[in-house]
């Protein structure tokens, strides 16, 4: 079983919900693996108060030209949809690495065997970190300056699924903000999508986008309203009704949550009243999944 925690707008508290839900699920006895697929700004480990383990590099294919064999036919440049390969007037190809998606189209269309060799570049790292809470955290960290996050998201999710299969239980995925290809790939094949929002005009607008994504992908969707007492909750409920989504939790603006956030200790481990919200959410998740773990 896979659960994705997302939310169109950044800053809604998505990671706070994901981290506290993970710990609450473990408190209820569920086995799980957690994946932080917000590879550009991963922070689940900070909210859990842990340091990441040493990362493993993730490589992406990059063509390397053997100019002694190249016939300067320009076919590689013509096949490159990313325009990562440019040619001089005589047809000599050159690669702009940051634009290369690693699709291998150039290698496929090249008519001369050996004219394009395999090379690689590191796009990021994957950190597989045991946590003191009884589950493994898989974190993708994009290399600074890297423009393509999707290959790293795909590989980090693959590693997380492998660990889930080895250890059993649930896979809880924390996605990036927005509804781009990295978010779509992160939530793909999930059994439940939890959209975290806030009752503000930008929050409602972006929640509509993530609900539309859930509908297109055929994933049952729940809504968690964070800072629910600071805006017009009614607009979120109207949106939920329109998309046949259920509002399963409301989290008030809370200094206690802020303190736990800053302290790197999930609030669900405290005796603050807000902890009960996440405990109840975890119980609903297990009921939805038929007992979980």
Image (cartoon, rainbow, N blue to C red):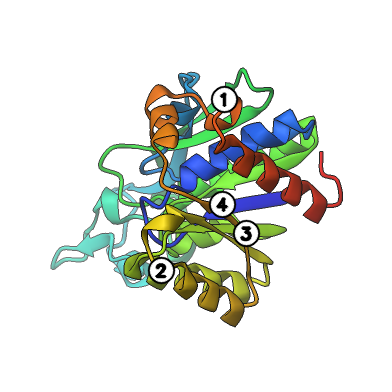
Quadrant assignment, res 10: bottom left
Which residue is under mark 2? Answer: 232
Q: Which of marks 2 and 1 is nearer the N terminus?
A: 2
The C terminus appears in which quarter of the rendering? top right
Distance in Å between CA atoms under marks 1 and 4 = 22 Å
Distance in Å between CA atoms under marks 3 and 4 = 6 Å
Residue depicted at x 58% and y 30%: 137
Distance in Å between CA atoms under marks 3 and 1 = 26 Å
In x, y percent, where is residue 136?
64, 27
The secondary structure type at the circle numbered 3 is: strand
Q: Are marks 3 and 1 in contact (CB under 8 Å)?
A: no
In x, y percent, where is residue 263?
40, 23
In the picture shown, does residue 292 fall above or below 217? Answer: above
Which residue is under mark 3? Answer: 193
Distance in Å between CA atoms under marks 2 and 1 = 29 Å
Q: Which residue lies furthest to the left in this view?
A: 89
Q: Residue furthest right?
A: 290
Q: Residue furthest bottom?
A: 242
In x, y percent, where is residue 36?
51, 40
Residue depicted at x 74% and y 42%: 170
Tag nearer the camera, 2 or 3:
2
Is residue 59 in view from this perspective? yes
Assess disc 3: are there few (<14), some (14-19) or many (≥20) residues with their C-alpha within 10 Å of its C-alpha.
many
Residue depicted at x 86% and y 51%: 290
Which residue is under mark 1? Answer: 270
Which residue is under mark 4? Answer: 5
28 and 46: which is toward the camera: 28
Q: Earlier in the sequence, mark 1 or mark 4?
A: 4
The secondary structure type at the circle numbered 2 is: loop
């Amino acid at each position: 079983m896979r659960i994705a925690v997302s939310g169109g707008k950044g800053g809604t508290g998505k990671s706070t919900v994901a981290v506290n839900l993970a710990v609450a699920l473990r408190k209820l006895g569920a086995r799980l693996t957690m994946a932080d697929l917000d590879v550009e700004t991963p922070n689940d480990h900070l909210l859990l108060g842990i340091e990441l383990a040493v990362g493993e590099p993730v490589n992406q294919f990059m063509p390397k030209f053997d100019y002694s064999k190249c016939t300067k036919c320009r076919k590689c440049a013509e096949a490159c949809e990313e325009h990562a390969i440019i040619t001089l007037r005589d047809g000599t190809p050159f690669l702009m690495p940051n634009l290369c998606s690693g699709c291998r189209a150039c290698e496929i269309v090249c008519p001369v065997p050996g004219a394009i060799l395999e090379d690689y570049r590191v796009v990021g790292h994957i950190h597989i970190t045991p946590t003191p809470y009884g589950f493994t955290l898989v974190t993708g960290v994009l290399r600074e300056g890297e423009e393509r996050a999707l290959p790293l998201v795909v590989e980090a999710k693959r590693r997380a699924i492998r660990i889930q299969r080895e250890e059993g239980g649930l896979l809880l995925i924390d996605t990036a903000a927005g509804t781009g290809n990295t978010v779509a790939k992160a939530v793909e094949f999930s059994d439940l999508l939890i959209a975290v929002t806030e009752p503000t005009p930008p929050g409602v607008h972006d929640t509509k986008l993530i609900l539309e994504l859930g509908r297109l992908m055929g994933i049952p969707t729940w809504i968690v309203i964070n800072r629910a007492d600071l805006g017009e909750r009614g607009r979120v409920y109207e949106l939920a009704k329109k998309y046949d989504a259920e509002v399963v939790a409301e989290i008030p603006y809370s200094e206690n949550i802020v303190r736990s956030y800053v302290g790197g200790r999930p609030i669900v481990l405290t005796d603050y009243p807000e902890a009960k919200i996440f405990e109840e959410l975890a119980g609903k998740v297990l009921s939805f999944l038929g007992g979980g773990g």
